[in-house]
Amino acid sequence: MPEYKGSEIRNVAVVGHGASGKTSLVDALAFVSGASKRHGSVKDGTALTDTAPEEIERGYSINLGCAYAEWMGAKINLIDTPGYLDFEGDAIAGLAAADGALCVVSATAGVEVGTERMFREAVKRGDPVLFVASMMDKEHASFDAVYDQIRERLTNKVIPVEVPIGEGPDFHGIINLFSKKAHLYKQGVKGGNYDEVDIPAELQPVFDKYYEQLIETIAATDDDLLERYLEGGELTRDDAVTAMKEAMKRMELFPLFCVSSELNYGTQAVLSTIVELMPSAWEMEELHAFKGAEGDHTVEVHATDDAPFAALVFKTMTEPHVGEVTYFRIFSGQVENGAELFNATRDGVEKLNHLSVSQGKDRTEVPMLHAGDIGCVAKLRNTHTNDTLSTRGHPVRLPQIMFPESVLQMAVHAVARADEEKLQAGLHHLHDEDPTFEMHYNAETHETIVSGIGERHLEVTLGKLKRKYGVDAELTKPSIAYRETIRATADGQGRHKKQSGGRGQFGDCWVRFLPRPRGAGYEFVNKIVGGSIPSKFIPAVDKGIQEAAVRGVLAGYPLVDFQVELYDGSFHTVDSNEMSFKMAGILGFKAVAPKCKPVLLEPLDELEIVTPDEYLGDVLGDLSARRGHILGTDTTPDGPRVRAVIPQAELHLYASALQSMTQGRATFTRHFHGYEEVPGETAQKVISEASREHEEALAH
Ligand SMILES: Nc1nc2c(ncn2[C@@H]2O[C@H](COP(=O)(O)OP(=O)(O)O)[C@@H](O)[C@H]2O)c(=O)[nH]1
Ligand SMILES: [Mg+2]
C-alpha cells in the first residue's frame, strides 16, 4: 500500500438505522475500489466489518468496524457503525474518528429513528453529511419517498445529485447530474462496471427537472455563482463541485445519492463523490479546530506531519488469537511502526509493534501513518477507549468522546458461585472495551449492578462475557436499597448482665433517639455527667448502636438519619468491659427504635427526559403511574424536556419502556436524587415481602 498524506485521506463514518444497508455498502465500496478482494455479504456472514461471532449470529452490527477503499489516489477510511440504539456508543465513537458522515437510508424502509438520531448527531458535531438511498434494487424501493422523508423529517437542505433509472427489480442505471451522463449497468455483472451514455431521450425531462433544481440550489449558496447564474451563465462541473463542497462544510447542503450495494450499482460514483466532496483529513482542521490539553494548558492540535503526535483511541476490541486491538485516529503528527508513545491519560509508555491498518478483520502492517489517518495496533499494555496516545515530549490529551449514558441497570450473578471472581474480572475488561457498559457493587444490597443502554446491549455483553472469559452469568432485577428512619423521639434502657461462674459481664445505658433531617446521617451525642458510665466505655455504646442499626426494626433495612443521646447508665467495677457496653448499646437500640415510629425510605432517581412533542402526554402519564413527581418541563431544540423524580423501585427497565412508548425517539439521563419516605400501602408490601424473605432465610 502506498503512503497516504493527510490531503489524500478521507475519513467517513457510515451511519444510519439498523438494517439500512451500511455494512453492505462499506463492503461494496472497499470491494469495488479493489482494496478488498472479495464482495462479502451480511447474509452469509462474510461482510468485511461484521466479524464478531455475536454479529454474524445476529446478522447486524454491534461494534464499529474499520475498512478502507483506495480511489482516485485517495485512501477513504470507512467506519461502519451499528444502527440500533443499544449500540449507539460505537456509532458516536465512529463519528468522533471521522470528518464526515455517509448517512444511509433504506429505499424501502425510508427515514427511521436511527437515521434521525445519527443525522442529528453528525450535525451537532458540525460534520458534512452525504445521504445515500440504499437497496434501490429491492422490491418497493422508492427514491422519491426517501427524498421526501429526508426533507420532511431531517432537513430541507437535502438535494439529489443522482437520479435512479428504474426502481426495485427494474433498477438498472443512474443519472449523474454533475457529469450530465447516465450510467447503465449490465445485468449479472457485479464489478460495478457500467456503460456511460448521454442522457437517454425519454429521461431528458427528468434530468432537466432535477438538474435545474440542483444548479439553482448550489448557486444560491454562493453570491458570485448566483450572479453568474442569474445572468444566464453556465456553471461548470468544477464550479458546481467546489461550491457544493464548501456548502457541505457549512452544513448548508446535503447531497443525496443512490446505490444498490448488493448489485454494486452506483458504488463507484459514491467513492468519487467522497473523494471530491468530503473534506480531507487535512482540511478538517478548519472544521473542528481541535484543541487538547497538555498538563493544565490548552494546546492547539494541527493535522500536519511535523506537529507533535496525538491520536485518539476510539475503540478497543478483544479479538480471538490476537488479544486486544486498539483503533486510533491520528489528529496530529505522524508515527512509525515500532514507535514508542506515551499514554498521557494513564501516564504509561506504549510501544506500537506491528503498526497496521485494518480491512475488516484483516490487518496490513505499514511502515508509517501520517496525520489524519486511522490505524490500529495489537497488545498495548494499558490503553483504553478515549485515551490519547502522544509523546513524552508533548503529553497531549485530546477531548474525549461523549458516550451516551448507561441508563438501564440490572443485577448480575455468576451462575456458578465459584465463577464470582472471574465474573468481576471479565466485567472490568468489558467496560474497558465499551465505555457504555458500566458496573458497580452495591454494598447495601450486596449485588453487582451492571448498566448499559438497553436490554439488548446487556444481553450481548453477557454473551461476550461467556465467549471471551468463560463465565456464565445471569441478569436479574436489582434489589432496591431501602432504608429505615424514625419519625419520633423516644428513650429507654439497654442493660446487659451475665453471671457465669467467674467474672461476669455488666453494661447499662439509657439512650434517647431523635429524628434527623433526610440525608443528615447518624450522630452520637454523649450527655453523661458525673461518670455514671466511665468515659472509656462510651464509644462501645456508640459502636453497639451502629452495629444494630445495620438491620432496622421494620424490615431489616439500615436505620439512618437519627441522633442518639446517651444520658445515663451504670457500671460494675469488676464485670464491666467494652464488650458489655457494646451489648448494652445493641439492647438499647432494640428497646428504643421500635418506639420511635419507624418508617421505610426508598431511593429515588432524578430523570431528565427529552421527547418529541407528540409523545409528551404518554410520557407524563406513564411517569405518574410510576409514582413520579414532575419537577418541571421546558423546551429544547429536540422537543420538550421533562424533569422528574421517581422511585428506583418503579424504574426497572424504564429505558425499554420509554423507547417503545416513543418509537425510540426519546432520550433520558438519570442520576441518584435521594431518599424519601415510602407511602403507606407500598411500604406495607415491602415490609411483608421482607419479613417473608427473612423467614425463608431462617428456615434454610
Ligand atoms: N436487495 C438488497 N439487499 C441489501 C442491499 N444492501 C443490504 N441488503 C440486505 O439488507 C440487510 C441489512 O443490510 P446491512 O448491510 O447489514 O445493514 P446495516 O444494519 O445498516 O449494516 C442484509 O440482509 C443485506 O443483505 C442491497 O443493495 N440490495
Ligand atoms: Mg451493519
Image (cartoon, rainbow, N blue to C red):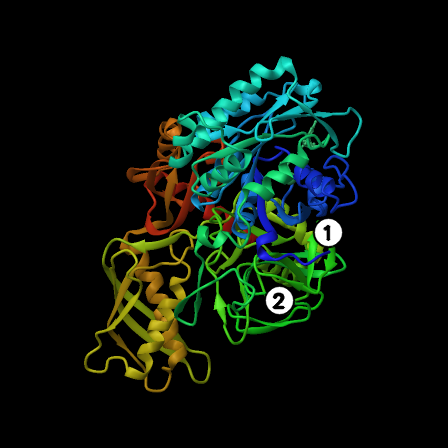
Q: Which percent across, then down, holds residue 639? A: 36, 34
Report the residue at 63% width, 63% height from top.
421
Extreme residue toward the bottom, this view = 574
Report the residue at 70% width, 68% height from top.
353
Q: Which residue is mark 2?
A: 335
Q: Which residue is mark 1?
A: 361
Extreme residue toward the top, this view = 202
Looking at the image, how many numbered discs can be counted on the residues? 2
Extreme residue toward the left, this view = 529
Secondary structure found at label 2: strand
Q: Nearer the viewer, residue 526 or 104?
A: 104
Q: Amino acid at mark 2?
A: Val
| Ligand 2 quarter of the rendering | top right
Give residue 391's quadrant in the image: bottom right
Asked if labels 2 and 1 touch by Cβ distance under 8 angstroms, the answer is no
Left or right: 383 in relation to 633? right
Of label 1 and label 2, which has the lower sequence position? Answer: 2
